[in-house]
Structure formats: structure tokens, C-alpha cells
Image: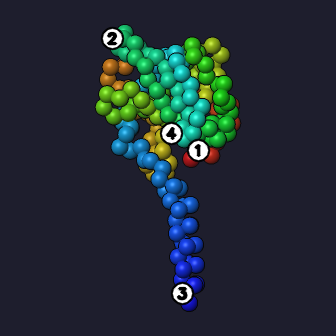
Amino acid sequence: MTRKLVGLFVMTLGFLTICTPMFAHHGTSGVYDFTHRITTKATVTEYIWANPHVQIYFKLKNDKGAEETWGVETVSTGNALANGWTKNSFKPGDQLLVSFVPAKGDRTFGTCPQFVFVADGKRLGGNGRCGMGGGAVDANTLPVKSGYTAVEVQMPKDDRKRPESEQEQQ
């Protein structure tokens, strides 16, 4: 009987050790300001193709004409591939129209990005829907963050002519 209990204990401990990281993913509700968006022209400065999230950094100008460097976190590399991205999709110097939800406070970072390449109109990123289920937000309907209203650009209509990922269907 003791041997069975020890075996059950070891199996349970092993299962918990393997499964615990699955529950460690972070939430975004306390980090990002889902009451505003920024939609503007930008120039890519850095593209980081790595897990847990692909990151893109770019320069943009605020209402006062001051240049700022912002970054956005996107999906994992696996989901990025499912969306038609590759590790070469963005290059420093690429001109973009970008729309994203900024972080709270004065942090120059965001999430839920949409990108349109100025050179050819190619669109990458989501459809503006942030989150899943009843808590999802349509970033396209959010007001523009104060300090970025004069630089707002119109994003072209999303024709959905790109691969859909599981995340974009929710």
C-alpha cells in the first residue's frame, strides 16, 4: 500500500511539475490601456523574432513633432507563421501605418497591433480585436490617445486577404 502511495505521489508531483508552466502565462488587463489607441505612420527600427512574443520597434512622431521609439508585442512565432509572417517580414527602415493599444502610464510599448506597409499596402497583424470572449475590445473603435490625435492616419479597410490564425478568428 505504501509503495502505491509513493508511486501516486511521485506521478502527481511529476504531472504538476510539467503542467504548472502552462498556467503561468501573463494577463494584459493591468498593463495596457484598452481605452485608447494610437494610429500613425512609423519607421521600423528593430524586429525581434523570438518567443514568447514577436516584438517590433519603430519610430513615430507625436503631436508636437517629437520623435519617439515605441515597441509592440505581437503573437508567438508559431502564430506569426500561421498569420503569414516570417523572420524577415519587417526590416529596419520599413515605412508603416501602425495602429495599436498603448501601455498604461508613460511606457512606450503596446499590444494588439495592425500594420500596413506604405510601399505596397501589404497588411500584417490582427484585425484590431484585442482579447477573447466577452472581454474582447475592438481597438478600431477606441478614441485616439491624447498627444497623438494630429498624427492619426486612416488605416485602409481590412480585406482579409491573408492567412487567418486561430487567434484572429476569435
Write the residue at 56% across / 67% down: 14
Q: Along the horizontal axis of the image, is 89 left or right of 97?
A: right
Where residue 12 sits in the image (x, y, percent)?
54, 72
Residue 67 higher or lower than 3, as above or below: above
Res. 2 mark: 3
Judge whether residue 131 can be spotted in this image.
Answer: yes
Inter-mark Cα distance, 2 to 4: 29 Å
Q: Amino acid at mark 3?
A: Thr
Q: Amino acid at mark 1?
A: Gln
Where is the N terminus found, in terms of image quarters? Answer: bottom right
Q: Which residue is mark 1?
A: 167
Q: Earlier in the sequence, mark 1 or mark 3?
A: 3
Residue situated in front as seen by the camera: 23 or 147: 23
Inter-mark Cα distance, 2 to 3: 73 Å
Helix, strand or loop status at disc 1: helix
Q: Residues within 10 Å of mark 2 (few under 14, many from 20)?
A: few
Q: Earlier in the sequence, mark 1 or mark 4?
A: 4
